Amino acid sequence: MSPVQSENCLQIGRELTRGLGAGGNPEIGMNAANESKEAIEGALYGADMVFVTAGMGGGTGTGGVPVIASIAKSMGILTVGIVTTPFSFEGRRRTVQAQEGIAALRDNVDTLIVIPNDKLLTAVTQSTAVTEAFNLADDILRQGVRGISDIIMAQD
């Protein structure tokens, strides 16, 4: 995903991954989140609602986001998941990993929104660069979070 401007950034699995990510392996993503459980709890402390977002199919999001959601839910925080599934051109392995990650996430959120990246292809042309297509997917996630957040904040 695109870099996020935030006051509170948290690198999960600092010891396990040494900042190199999960290498497309959801088990490493899961272990990275578990390694950072206390830091995640600290970051979530005091929150009434948490959005967990990820592009599913790789390692960090697929393996880590269900753990983060589980931590949030165990803290009594309303937890909303918004994830994308891989583009079909990313291959069967990523699709299967995404399905498994979504199943794990579903058990740990109050609400889950799944956005198929392939649906985004209707918004681009054949000449659209792959990186631009991924950026579009990130933007859709951002818009989803903002839309839900705006609705909730308007009710306060």
Image (tube, grey):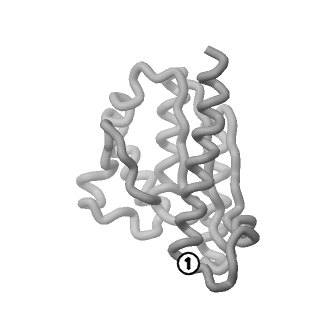
User: Residue tagged by mark 1?
Assistant: 130
The spot of residue 113 in percent (x, y) is 70, 46
The spot of residue 38 in percent (x, y) is 32, 33
Say whether residue 6 is left or right of residue 79.
left
Q: Nearer the viewer, residue 77 or 3?
A: 3
Q: In this view, does 21 lie above or below 39?
A: below
Quadrant of residue 149 within the rendered picture: top right
Q: In which quarter of the image is the C terminus?
A: top right
Q: At x 32% / y 43%, what residue is drawn?
A: 9
Q: At x 39% / y 63%, what residue is drawn?
A: 22
Q: How crowded is mark 1: few (under 14 residues within 10 Å), some or many (20 or more)?
A: few
Q: At x 28% / y 57%, what residue is drawn?
A: 16
Q: In this view, does 17 lie above or below 78?
A: below
Q: Which of 124 and 44 is in front in this view?
A: 124
Q: In this view, does 119 lie above or below 89?
A: above
State the residue lying farthest toward the bottom: 127
